[in-house]
Image (cartoon, coloured by chain):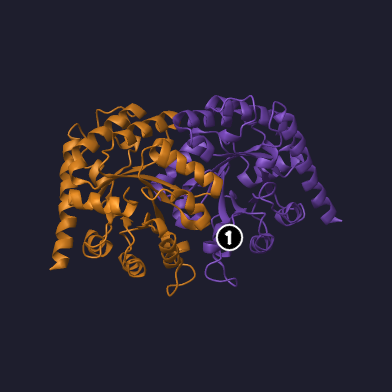
Chain colours: A orange, B purple
Amino acid sequence: MTMNFTDRLRHAVHQRQSHLCVGLDPESDKLPRGLDRSPEGIVQFCRDLVISTAEYAAAFKINFAFFEALGHAGWRALEQVAALLPENVIRIADAKRGDIGNSAKHYARAILHELPFDCLTVNPYLGEDAATPFLENPAKGAFFLCHTSNSSAREIQHFPDRTQPLYLHVAARVAEWNANKNCGLVVGATHAEELKQVRTVCPELPFLIPGVGAQGGDLQTSAVVGTSGGAVPALINVSRAIIFAGDDKNFATAAANAARKFQSDIQLAIHESAR
Amino acid sequence: MTMNFTDRLRHAVHQRQSHLCVGLDPESDKLPRGLDRSPEGIVQFCRDLVISTAEYAAAFKINFAFFEALGHAGWRALEQVAALLPENVIRIADAKRGDIGNSAKHYARAILHELPFDCLTVNPYLGEDAATPFLENPAKGAFFLCHTSNSSAREIQHFPDRTQPLYLHVAARVAEWNANKNCGLVVGATHAEELKQVRTVCPELPFLIPGVGAQGGDLQTSAVVGTSGGAVPALINVSRAIIFAGDDKNFATAAANAARKFQSDIQLAIHESAR
C-alpha cells in the first residue's frame, strides 16, 4: 500500500533527522557572481544548491514566481530543477494556486502529475470544492495558506477580531478536508503567538513554516511549537539565508554550511524542549 | 498622460458597446474535432476564437490552468495566444496569483510585463503588501477574488456570519487599495444576492463577473447590478458556452453567434433596466 502524504513527510523527516526545508527562490538579479543571469544560470545555481544541501534537508520548496518571470524558458528551467530534486525528500511546489473545480483539476495535473512534485501550496479562499482536486491522490498533498509571514497578514486573516479570527477558521476547515491524510498548513514563523494558536486548534496537521532567516522569524518557537516538541512532522523553510549565504563561486559551500547550521539548530531546539 | 486601468476598461466597454468578456479555457480534451490535442492545436483554437468573437468582446480572459497543464510548451502557447489578443480590448490573465512581496513582484513581472496582459486575477488572502506589486502601474490592474462562483464559496467567504461576511470585508479593503484607480473585484453571477451586497459596499469598483453560461449564473442580474444600470464598467465573463458552442470545424462561427447573443442580451438587460 502506498503511504499517505503525511506519513511520507514523517518518514522523510525521520530518515534525515531534519525538519529543514530549503527554499529555492532563484531571483536572477541576485545570482552569485560568475553565474549567467539566464534560465540556464538558474538551473546551474539550483543544481549546485540541491547537491550541496540535500543531506541536511527533509524537503525542497521551489518558488514558481522566479521561474514564471522568465517566460516559457523559465518554465522549462522549473521542469529541469524539479527533476533534479532527490526522490527521498519532500518536493514542494510553492505555487499558491487556488481556483474553482475544473481549473483546479488542471493546476493539480500541471504540478502533481506533469511535474514531479509531492505537494503544493494552495490558497484556501475558495473553499473545499476548490481544494479537493489537489487532495484526490493520498500520496500527494497540499499545504493551505493559514497565517502568512508578511506584515499585512492580519488585514484579512485576523478578520473579524482576535477572538475568532479567519485563520483559525481556515485551520479548522482544513482539518476537515484531511480525510486522505494529505493536508497541511502554511503558518509563518514571524507571528509566534498565532503559530501557537493554530497548533492548539490543529494538534496533528503538518505545518510548513516560512519566515525564518531573512524575514527574521523565530526559529526556536517555530521548531518547538511547529513540531509539538518533535511529535508532528513540520517543515521549517529557509530560503535566502541559505541560497544567498555566499555571493561568489563558493556559494554552494556557504549554502551547505548555512543549511547544516539551521538543521542542527532546529534539532537542538526540539531536543532541549523535550527534556 | 496614460489612462488609469479603470478608465481603459470604461473606454473598451464604451467603444465596443459590450460588457462581454470571452473566457479562453482551452481544455485540450474538449477541443473541437479536427484540432490537434496539443499546444499547437490550442493556439489554433484560440486564434480562431479571438478572430471570430473580437467584435462582440470588450475583454478576453485567459485561464492559465489549461496552459500550465501542458508544461513549458503550454506556457509557450500561452505567450502565443496572449500576443494574438487585440490591443484595444482588455486582456485579463486569469491566474489567481497571490504571494508575499518579493514573490508577488515577480508574478507581476511575469504577467504584466513579460506577457502583454492589462490585468490579472489576484487572491486577496495575504493582504495589502501582497497586492501592491500588482498595482504600481496605474495603467495595469488587478481583479481581486471577492465572492467566487463555485458552490463551496460560502465556506470561507461567508465567515463568520451573514451580517458581516468576509467577502464584504475584502470588498471594503480592496476599495482602500484603489488609490491608482486600477482595482476591481471578482464576484460570481451564481450568487445574485451577494453580488447586490458587494455593489452596495463598492458602488464604483469595476467587477469581473464569472459564472454566466455553463455555470448557470443569472445574466439579467449580473448585467444590471454589475454595471449599476450601465454606470460602472463591469465585465461579464462567458467561457464554455461560447468557446465550446460548436464541437466541429464550424466552432468559430458557433462561438461568434453565441458571443453576439450574450453581448446583445447583456446590453438589452441594461437598457431595459434604465427605462
Is residue B6 something one can see in this rendering?
A: yes
Identify which residue, A184 or B53, lies in the foreground: A184
- Please provide percent x and percent y for residue B268: 82, 48
* In this rendering, position of residue B228 left or right of residue A240: right
- Where residue B218 sits, quadrant-wise, is bottom right
- Count of all numbered marks drawn on residues in the image: 1
- Residue at screen point 52% across, 49% down: A99
- Residue at screen point 69% across, 53% down: B217
User: Farthest residue in the bottom direction?
Assistant: A163
- Residue at screen point 45% across, 39% down: A110
* In this rendering, position of residue A197 left or right of residue B154: left
Is residue A38 something one can see in this rendering?
A: no
- Please provide percent x and percent y for residue B73: 47, 28
From the viewer's perspective, is residue B154 above or below residue B181?
Answer: below
* Residue at disc 1, secondary structure: helix
The chain carrying label 1 is B
- Please provide percent x and percent y for residue B61: 61, 40
- Residue at screen point 61% across, 32% down: B31
Q: Which residue is mark 1?
A: B171
- Where residue A272 sits, quadrant-wise, is bottom left
* In this rendering, position of residue A229 left or right of residue B224: left
From the viewer's perspective, is residue A8 above or below residue A74?
Answer: below
Q: Residues within 10 Å of mark 1 (few under 14, many from 20)?
A: many
From the viewer's perspective, is residue B27 above or below residue A12?
Answer: above
- Please provide percent x and percent y for residue B130: 45, 52
User: Farthest residue in the front direction?
Assistant: A1
Identify which residue, B232 or A25, lies in the foreground: A25
User: Hey, what amino acid is under mark 1?
Assistant: Ala
Q: Which part of the image, by quadrant, shows the C terminus of chain A? A: bottom left
Identify which residue, B160 or A33, lies in the foreground: B160
